[in-house]
Image (cartoon, coloured by chain):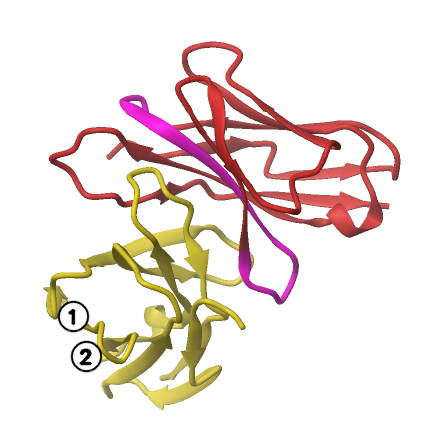
Chain colours: A yellow, B red
Amino acid sequence: SQQGEEDPQALSIQEGENATMNCSYKTSINNLQWYRQNSGRGLVHLILIRSNEREKHSGRLRVTLDTSKKSSSLLITASRAADTASYFCATDAQLKGEKLTFGTGTRLTIIP
Amino acid sequence: EPEVTQTPSHQVTQMGQEVILRCVPISNHLYFYWYRQILGQKVEFLVSFYNNEISEKSEIFDDQFSVERPDGSNFTLKIRSTKLEDSAMYFCASSSYDRSTTDTQYFGPGTRLTVL
């Protein structure tokens, strides 16, 4: 079994629409983070949500966390062509400095 | 804004050769990490480093791999004898020790290693 599975694996939407990506995980977590990766490039940190938080906003991003279901969602509102990228969730367990376990990612394509 | 940097951006090497990938973490960070991503696959943890020693390592991080903090700014990953399957993007990351800040790990742009 794998910690961190995103769905859908790929998502194509029209510019201006909202995009929702989901992430499920299997073990208890301390934090859940979302990262963006443009093709062949580095990982850009988007947002971190702690296990005792349920929702967090940052600009056009909204992240929810349901620890009872071991799942999180990332909502990007009013999508833009520049949002085209792969999005990954990553979890860490308990300790400060803990390794991140990444999901498989959602490939988001925004159609102009 | 401070950022993690990595050099080189692309390294091509022959199988069996040694490579050293270099990283400069964010200056006030004390936790350092290496991850790798084989093309088309998920990002995988290799090793974490704190207080001049390895905190944790994955099964991937075998005897062919080593890490070092040779001075106050650099953090290196050495692969002693590269194999074809070591071809991947290698990411360095760092995070702060400060308990008042978040546990965000900041990633560098990566080094693409190609083993021929």
Mark 1 vs mark 2: same chain?
yes
| Residue A4: x %, y % from top left | 43, 69
Location of mark 2 (residue):
A77
Task: State which quadrant residue B21 falls in.
Answer: top right
Task: State which quadrant residue A63 falls in.
Answer: bottom left
Say left or right for B85 vs B51. Answer: right
Q: Residue at x 57, y 25 (%)?
A: B76
Q: Chain of mark 1?
A: A
The amino acid type found where label 1 is placed reads Arg
Between A24 and B12, the residue placed more toward the observer is A24
Say left or right for A8 vs B89. Answer: left
Q: Residue at x 15, y 38 (%)?
A: B101
SS for tag 1? loop
- Quarter of the N terminus of chain B within the rendering: top left
Q: Residue at x 23, y 76 (%)?
A: A76
Q: Is residue B91 above or below residue B3?
A: below
Say left or right for B90 vs A10. Answer: right
Q: CA distance from mark 1 to mark 2?
A: 5 Å
Asked if the residues shown at circle 1 and circle 2 are in contact, with their CB atoms under 8 angstroms apart, the answer is yes
One can see residue B51 in this view: yes
Location of mark 1 (residue):
A60
Q: Mark 1 or mark 2, which has the lower sequence index?
A: 1
| Residue A52: x %, y % from top left | 12, 61
| Residue B53: x %, y % from top left | 49, 21
Whether the magenta-drawn stretch holds residue B41 is answered as yes
| Residue A101: x %, y % from top left | 44, 57
Between B30 and A17, the residue placed more toward the observer is B30
Between B86 and A94, the residue placed more toward the observer is A94
The amino acid type found where label 2 is placed reads Thr
Whether the magenta-drawn stretch holds residue A46 is answered as no
Write down the region rendered in magenta: B26-43
